[in-house]
Image: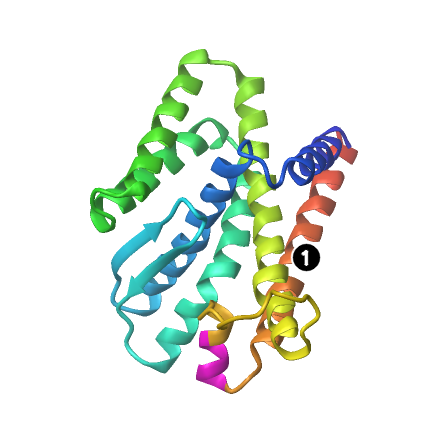
Amino acid sequence: MKQLGRYVLILIVVIVLWNTIIIKPLKLFAVFLHELGHAFMAFIFGQGIQAFKVNLDESGHVIAQVKGWFSSFMVANGGYLGSVIFALLILYLKRTSFKKLILGTLAILLLIVSISFSGFSFTLLYSVLFAVFVILLYMVQNERVNEWVIDIIGISSVAYAIYDTFVDTILLQLNQKLNLIQGWKGQQPVTDAVQLARMTGTPAVIWGVIWLGIAVFAVSVTVMKTKGVRGRR
């Protein structure tokens, strides 16, 4: 229960500080996970990627080399689903012997992807700053601080993925149809859900609901497993 309480505390603080500069680096990390999800699917079901970008305004894109319709379908689904899975994987690995290597592995992964596919850009700058932060953290050699950082990264990434799915997919699509929020219209951005809608004929909002349902289910399973582990001690 102690771990669950920490998760709840982190989530509350993240929500309270959501629109502040303090949470900005965590949001950017979540965008990295989103784009890594696309890239991961591109390497599995396609022919890799040509470009990988994460921008200061929390946007990003991956130029993937796909093989056909199914390849494009899997790559399009990789963003939202991948970001949740990666974030939960981080939280899961913290309970294993791999715990001390999580942040270092993430830093190396971000650097490799940025150097290989981003060139000299904000993406690379963020990766370098993240690597420096991790090096300083390892120099401190405080296991409790390391655990808190992993939990903060994991929980904030899950929160951002769920928020992004709800706002930029479900709520945006509903507003396009019903004009629920005055002034929030304009040209519809080509999101992952819009791409899938064009590919399948299924409305983008439906894809948003599917992603949101999977995310909430995955988070619930992770939380219940956390409670179960604590209960056996």
Q: Measured along the vertical axis of the image, is residue 187 above or below residue 151?
A: below
Q: Position of residue 46 (x, y in %)?
A: 30, 69
Q: Which residues are magenta?
A: 195-200
Residue, far front = 183
User: Is residue 95 visible to the viewer in this orientation of the structure?
Assistant: no
The image quadrant of residue 231 is top right
Residue located beneath label 1 in the image: 216
Q: Position of residue 65 (x, y in %)?
A: 26, 68
Q: Measured along the vertical axis of the image, is residue 147 above or below residue 208?
A: above
Judging depth in this view, the residue of 120 and 74 nearest the camera is 120
Total numbered labels placed on residues in the image: 1
Q: Residue at x 75, y 41 (%)?
A: 228
Judging depth in this view, the residue of 185 and 230 nearest the camera is 185
* Left or right, residue 151 beside residue 77: right
The image quadrant of residue 1 is top right
Q: Residue at x 74, y 33 (%)?
A: 230
